[in-house]
Image (spheres, coloured by chain):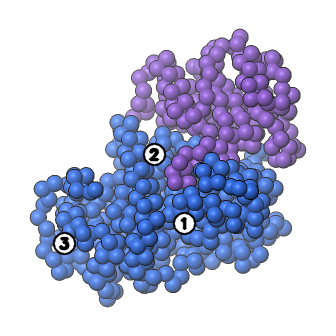
Amino acid sequence: MSGTYLGMPSFPEAAKDAVHNVTLRANLRHATHTIRDKRARAVAELADWAQLREAGKQIKNRTLRHLDRYLEQLETAVTEAGGTVHWAADAEEANRIVADLVKATGEREVVKVKSMATQEIGLNEALEAEGISAYETDLAELIVQLGDDRPSHILVPAIHRNRGEIRDIFAEKMGSWGRPAPDGLSDTPTELAEAARLHLREKFLRAKVGISGANFMVAETGTLVVFESEGNGRMCLTLPETLISVVGIEKVVPSWRDLEVFLQTLPRSSTAERMNPYNSMWTGTVDADGPQTFHLVLLDNGRTDTLADEVGRQALRCIRCSACLNVCPVYERAGGHAYGSVYPGPIGAILSPQLRGIQSEIDASLPYASSLCGACYEVCPVAIDIPEVLVHLREKVADQGGKGHRLEKAAIKAAGWVLNHPAALAAGERVASRTRKLHPKKPPGAGAWTASRELPELPAESFRDWWKKNRT
Amino acid sequence: MSASRERILARVRAAVADAPEAPEPTRDYLTTHTPDDPAAILDLLHENLADYRAIVHRTTADELPLLLMRLLAERGSATVLVPPGLPPEWLSAADATRIHDRSVSTAQELDAVDSVVTGCALAIAETGTIVLDAGPGQGRRRITLIPDHHICVVRVPDQIVASVPQAMPRLDPTRPLTWISGPSATSDIELDRVEGVHGPRTLEVVLLRD
Ligand code: SF4
């Protein structure tokens, strides 16, 4: 993945710092609790949530089972609609394809709409090395980029920054990237958003090349879909002459109709809205409307390895809603940076070690960055059994002679939470043990996890109930 | 065919070779969450649009020109973008200078226009969404993006559906689609919602009874 994260300390080490950062912890706590409460209300509006979740899971499972077929179908449809499809086996190849495409336009600047795939491959840095400036246009990404920082949350990447810090970053840094912040900029969100609007509008109006990811790609029609709120996505997707979209191969869905499921579940799970302010859907190119040149770069970068793991492949169902982050007690303590990847929180703990392999210290430690409480599974709109995959990956780490048990203790301790709340950990484990259908041949949570402990009794109350009663 | 294409497809095939067959998805979710009553669906659309801070008006064909005149005048809009195919009578009373979108007009030129008036492809009540598909009266995607004020006219009841599953079969994915639910907004700064970062800061929806 991105070179940005090379040499990251393991999760326990990284989490230790975060736990001692009072601002970070307060911001995170406020954010995760606010979003999770709103999300619960948005989900409760739909009486058929369970059915939508099951349909989402099945659509994605079917996609993954026949991924070759759907990718070929997608390629044909995009090509027929006037686009060009490229295939990239890894980050390096994807970056080279994009850099060459940008250079072929003769441009040295591109505007970008937030995309996890391009962060994953470190595209901005790769373009910079080729003398191309890539401007992030999502407000939070702008804050992160100007602050020379890294994102800490999938949905609200600058959640670790408060308004005072953002004001200072804008006042200090905007000038060196383009239009400076207005004099006397205050720290009210309205004024900060206005400063971003003015700063970025200049870039949008003159940009010739836009770069995006996509939330979904429809095999049947060749349609790409981007969900967003601010309108920066629409700017990047419609104003430039050339559009380059870099998308993970798992983002395809078979049919147009399949979108009706995710159009209902993604906004509610993610921003807790009935619908996010803007969705853009485009199919190839359209005469005189939007970019006249469209390139789609299909990215593997570890996804086919993940697909080959029969337990772990379910992580590829993820639609990046970030609901699992907001309910995770470990994420709330440790913050997104501790996960050492663009994918933080529970999904990051299972996705990064699969995409990158478990050889490095950080990747070997990630499967332990969890209390296995199961809250992430409960909220996931595509029913990814994250605890099941965590346990499975712990076994793999143990099998390669990793320091599994030590890592587990260190991770939990570093998150600074369970030490004070041993009953919570126990309750979490029990729920995890009871509700997960773990490897049927072995006892629940087998391997590294249970090697040195007794299997717990069934809990008298669920973790969620315990949490509500005991969490201050 | 690129080497990576073949390599990726081969890796996919190898990865799922032993995977169990995945059935067609079960679609036992609801096609609507709203009673099949046009008045209730209209009220729900109105409520959800307003909840997302769009300004909602209801009017008739006779009163539409005066309403649009008033809305543009109240904002002091001197210029209004007119997509090709917008019924000319809609703006017959408006004082603002009409600017016709041409493919040669630059983004900077559009940036100088105060307002835009469009129709839509349909509106979705349960989510408070209007969908544009670049059809007649809507124009290119960018004309509803750059001006700071967007007035969108929805024909009642023809253009209203209750739910997302009802919307999908009525939309043509080969057209560029823009789904709009309230004005542009961000919650990136301490989760305080701020309207209008880049898209129009004001969205007015006119529900036009036949
Ligand atoms: S794992 Fe599930 S809950 Fe977490 S981000 Fe992905 S889809 Fe959302």
Disc assigned to residue A151: 1
* Quadrant assignment for the N terminus of chain B: bottom right
For numbered disc 1, what is the local secondary structure?
loop
Disc assigned to residue A442: 3
Q: In this view, does B146 lie above or below A312?
A: above
Looking at this view, is B45 or A446 the one in front? B45
Instruction: Give the amino acid at mark 3.
Output: Lys
Q: Do labels 3 and 2 share a chain?
A: yes
Disc assigned to residue A367: none
Q: How far apart are marks 1 and 2 (CA)?
A: 20 Å
Badge 2: residue crowd in 10 Å (few <14, some 14–19, many ≥20): many
Chain for numbered disc 2: A
Instruction: Give the amino acid at mark 2.
Output: Ala
Q: Residue at x 24, y 76 (%)?
A: A449
Q: Is residue B72 above or below residue A464?
A: above
Q: Tell me if label 1 and label 2 are in contact, CB under 8 Å.
A: no
- Of label 1 and label 3, which has the lower sequence position? 1
Chain B's colour is purple
- Of label 3 and label 2, which has the lower sequence position? 2
Task: Give x and y (percent) for residue A154.
Answer: 50, 60
Q: Which residue is drawn at 59% across and 37% down?
A: B182
Task: Give x and y (percent) for residue A260.
Answer: 49, 41
Q: Are marks 1 and 3 on the same chain?
A: yes
- Report whether A402 appears left or right of A124: left
Disc assigned to residue A272: 2
